[in-house]
Image: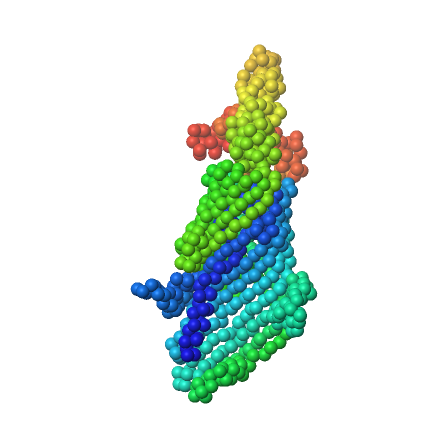
Amino acid sequence: MKNKLTKIYFTIVLLLLSFNHLFAQQDLTMYNMPAIGQSIRVNPSLMPVNKYYVGIPFISSNYLLFSHNAFVYHDFYKIRSDDSVQIDVSNALSKLKKSNYLKTDFQIDYLSLGITLNKFYITGNITEHVAFRFAYAKELLQLINEGNGPFIGQKLDFSKTGFDATHYREYALGLAHEINDQWTVGGRLKYLYGMENFSSTTGELGLITAEEDYHLQLPTDVVINTSGPVNSEDGYDQFNDNDGNTASGNVKDYLFHQKNRGFAVDLGGTYKPNDTWSFSASVLDLGSIKWKSDVRNYRSRAGQYDFNGVDLKSFLNDTSANIQGALDSLGKVFKAEETHDSYKTNLPTQVNLSSNYTIDDNSFAGALVHAEFFKKTIQPAVTLSYNRMVGRHLSVAASYSYINHTFDNIGLGMAVNAGPVQLYIVSDNVLGAIAPLDHHNSHVHFGINLIFGKPLRDRDKDKVPDIKDDCPDVPGLIDLKGCPDRDHDGIPDYLDRCPDTPGLRQFNGCPDSDNDGVVDSLDNCPTTPGLIEFLGCPDTDGDSIPDPEDSCVTVKGLRMFDGCPDTDGDGVRDSQDSCVLVPGPASNNGCPIIKKEVIVPKEPVKAQLTVQEQEVINKVFRNLEFETGKAVIRSTSFTSLDELSALLKKKTTFRLLIEGHTDNVGSDASNLKLSQRRAEAVKKYLTDKGIDATRIVSKGYGEMEPVADNKTAEGRQRNRRVEFTILE
């Protein structure tokens, strides 16, 4: 008889588990339906389409969700040939997963509204919740149904088993803000008023059946907490007074004066990097409730307990009398303690991650990953969806979801605006809604809102409302306030003086190809960087004559000679001057006119030097080096020049002739200058060492006196020289 009663009780439990109509904020399809104001509750950063909405109390938001990841109602019975029904518990148990999850969240809105103010969206709601979560292991129901026989010698671990039943009221205020064209953030702060709770906290919970004598070993560390009127004394568990009248004071205290308080937040963000993609994330129900009213705690002392059973013979002789005795025996084993300490429960936090791809102006596709955290379990879901606006009065959505390890979840959603009245209905699994006894998930969410402030008009269909569109009749870009940009340079066409060529903002959209600060349309040398004062053309030799007008680009010159030099300043350009370094009239090709009576000075006479003195001269000749292309003596030459200085100080009658020469690389004029400057550099070094400048003569001959063939590198090296001659 007892076994039969146990089977009946257990079957009822299974039926309740399989046929639970659950109410939960798991709106996988509504997540991407901004036409419905309540969508902000699954992502606080969403900006609904309508400027204002007010939910009609008690019917603005209604949920119906059936969700259980193990078995369904029709797993329990079979139809016999005589049309009778046979209960089949074993078949239902065979559907169990290793970890099973059940949840419910019944909600009623007393107040629900949303208001758009510029780039802000403000929402508020007062909502009643009755929530239930139950996570349990497969072996728990098998143990209840079959007893501990199949598990003799095994250790069963129920540490992940837990439940939480809560009744609370939520007062919420939300704010979403469109920071810019890419980022929108939002949050909802929720004050929680707790009314009842029944929950467990599990540290260690298990069962071991000994192989020898089948006694039970129970490693247990469990706390069961309760808070609510059922715990109260003197009439709180019945809302009537002694005369049968309603105890209005008790009801009022129950509804508004409980000491259970808590807070929670919802957070969300949306990022739109371009017109095609958007990404969003939200975290919901991040918070807890502290329970203080009518609290009772039932704690088992941590440890391993042994239960050797009861005397079966005496139990069967008087079943009714010994049931309480058996329970008392179990109570003594577990040694549960009752206390009245306040405790805290966390809301089951949810996380959503979503990405959307815009197909056209009226439709987009989305992907959503959802997870709910309860105790030590994570419940995932994945949804693919398609949303479309049909005109201005109808929004439709279709989705496909993986929920609770099932793949047969086809969702549909619709919001219809009939004047100021909006009717909406959304389902994450319409097949389950039609046949809930055969599905793990059936969900319907429907309601009625009053909407005001029509969606902002966008007559050019560029997703920028006309009120914010600087070009309302021409499709454009969101980043440019609805104006087009044909050349994609970030400057709207109506401000772009060169709308078909990418350009710079400082030039009103016109290009500067060579980046020299002169716009191409005014640049005389648009492909070569130049100077502003020469309208974008360069001046390579720095003679203030732009290269296009300079006949000698690399040599400083005079404007009168088209940028070419006149080294001796005789009015004859060097290219036409036969005596570049000596002034002369143009009539004599730039050379001076020598009178016939000119007395030719005697040639200087070389001094007779000793071998040691000649070696000093030779050493200077060998070691003298200059910086490349410059008249700067290298430091490696200083030692030999110092020896020459010492010789001249010793021989005061000696005079020195210094002659500079170059190869034929470069222009005649530049070579002549370089040879002269190098000879003068040596003279200056010696005079700085104390040698009288009148004793030294320096001359430059440029390339005019080669000593080798300039056609070879070796010959050119020999021609680049400075010669020293000691004169009497």
Residue sitting farthest toward the top:
587
The quadrant holding residue 49 is top right
Q: Residue 515 at x, y = what percent?
A: 56, 31
Res 456 seen here: yes
Residue drawn at point x = 57 percent, y = 76 percent: 299
In front: 148, or 727?
Answer: 148
Residue drawn at point x = 44 percent, y = 63 percent: 18
Residue drawn at point x = 53 percent, y = 73 percent: 203
In front: 627, or 436?
Answer: 436
The quadrant holding residue 673 is top right
Q: Residue 610 at x, y = what percent?
A: 55, 38
Q: Residue 166 at x, y = what percent?
A: 57, 64
- Relative vertical location of residue 76 with respect to residue 221 in this rendering, above or below: above
Location of the C terminus by quadrant is: top right
Residue drawn at point x = 64 percent, y = 61 percent: 193
- Relative vertical location of residue 570 with respect to residue 266 in this rendering, above or below: above
Res 286 seen here: no
In front: 129, or 201?
Answer: 129
Q: Residue 671 at x, y = what percent?
A: 54, 27
Residue sitting farthest toward the front:
243
Answer with left or right where residue 535 lies relative to residue 403: right
- Relative vertical location of residue 441 with respect to residue 587 in this rendering, above or below: below
